[in-house]
């Protein structure tokens, strides 16, 4: 069953972070989890001794930013957090945003990190998309990302859950987790395998294309393998639809999200290579960056939300 005791919510006070906060608060309330709000205080590294620059005292700036962060975190949850919901507010100094967040995560050992995927630069230390991707890559727990701007941001919801499947054990963990999430919140699941035919330079065979399998040739065996994979994956019984498509992994996943009005993507961050068509970490990061719905990245290492 799902176990979430501690949630870390890094905030840059951008509009995107406000959208992510809704999900963080809803999940904390659903599981009775302790919510940790964190703002990373990071200054530019320009040399203050350079006579062409005239900066105020760096310590004074940091203290001012920390006071502002405290006030904005308090105002951000005022009237939004349920009575009795434990919320810990903190700020942490660092040289750059992502390592600062990761250091804090190591200290509090959260079960889940919830954050926005976009922001902007400036003294407000907003979280850039690249920062989020670094957290997804290196955090020791699952990461729920909510895209800023337009698109569905509410999670949890009863909207369908999409699980890209590459037949690796990592994607099996993702499907097992998705089943518990779907059972908890009354959602259905779409399990999707994308057949991506490898493209090789013709020079590999002296100008002749390599003889790689055609999708229609292997479609039957792939469907059988997907049915077996779903049947053998543990978890509660929930409505699950199986899908096979041919194409490039990232565009196919993103198109599926739009066509089926997906409310959450649960994706493994690592896979394997070969005919099974794996979802490499880079694919996961591109889905995190471009998906219009929330994305839950399941780690191939570290914590799992299934207790």
Image (tube, helix red, strand yellow):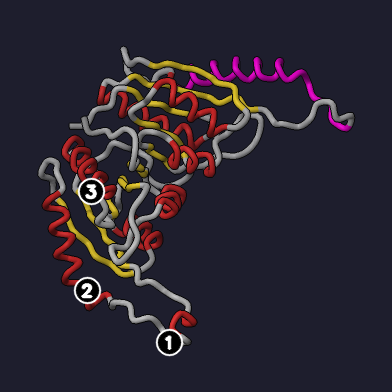
Q: Earlier in the sequence, mark 3 or mark 1?
A: 3
Q: Which residue is mark 1?
A: 208
The dominant secondary structure in magenta is helix
Query: Which residue occupies 28% across, 78% down?
Result: 214
Among the 4 quarters of the image, the one containing residue 147: top left
Q: Which residue is mark 2?
A: 218
Judging depth in this view, the residue of 230 and 117 nearest the camera is: 230
Q: Which residue is mark 3?
A: 172
Residue at the top extreme of this rendering: 84
| Quadrant occupied by the C terminus | top left
Q: Earlier in the sequence, mark 2 or mark 1?
A: 1
Query: Which residue occupies 44% across, 26% down?
Result: 105
Find residue 180 and report its horizontal and vertical position in percent.
19, 38
Other residues around mark 3 within 10 Å, as few (<14) / some (14–19) / many (≥20): many
On whether residue 55 falls in the magenta region, the answer is: yes
Judging depth in this view, the residue of 23 and 171 nearest the camera is: 171
Judging depth in this view, the residue of 156 and 284 nearest the camera is: 284
């Amino acid at each position: 069953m799902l176990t979430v005791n501690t949630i870390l919510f890094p905030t840059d006070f951008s509009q995107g972070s406000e959208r992510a906060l809704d999900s963080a608060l809803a999940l904390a309330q659903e599981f009775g989890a302790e919510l940790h709000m964190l703002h990373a205080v990071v200054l530019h590294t320009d040399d203050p001794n350079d006579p062409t620059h005239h900066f105020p005292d760096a310590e004074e700036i940091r203290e001012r930013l920390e006071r502002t962060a405290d006030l904005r975190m308090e105002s951000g949850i005022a009237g939004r957090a349920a009575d009795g919901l434990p919320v810990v507010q903190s700020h942490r100094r660092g040289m750059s945003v992502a390592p600062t967040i990761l250091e804090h995560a190591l200290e509090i050992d959260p079960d889940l990190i919830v954050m926005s995927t976009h922001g902007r630069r400036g003294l407000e230390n907003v979280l850039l998309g690249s920062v989020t991707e670094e957290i997804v890559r290196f955090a020791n727990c699952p990461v729920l990302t909510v895209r800023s701007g337009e698109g569905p941001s509410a999670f949890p919801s009863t909207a369908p859950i999409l699980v890209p499947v590459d037949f690796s054990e990592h994607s099996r963990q993702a499907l097992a987790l998705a089943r518990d999430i779907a059972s908890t919140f009354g959602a259905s699941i779409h399990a999707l395998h994308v057949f991506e035919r490898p493209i090789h330079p013709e020079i590999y065979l002296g100008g002749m294309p390599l003889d790689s399998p055609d999708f229609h040739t292997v479609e039957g065996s792939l469907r059988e393998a997907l049915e077996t994979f779903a049947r053998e994956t543990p978890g509660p019984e929930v409505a699950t639809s199986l899908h096979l498509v041919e194409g490039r992994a990232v565009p196919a996943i993103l198109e599926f999200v739009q066509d089926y009005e997906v409310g959450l993507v649960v994706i493994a961050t690592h896979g394997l290579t070969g005919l099974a068509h794996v979802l490499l970490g880079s694919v996961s990061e591109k889905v995190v960056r471009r998906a219009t719905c929330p994305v839950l990245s399941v780690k191939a290492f570290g914590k799992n939300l299934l207790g």
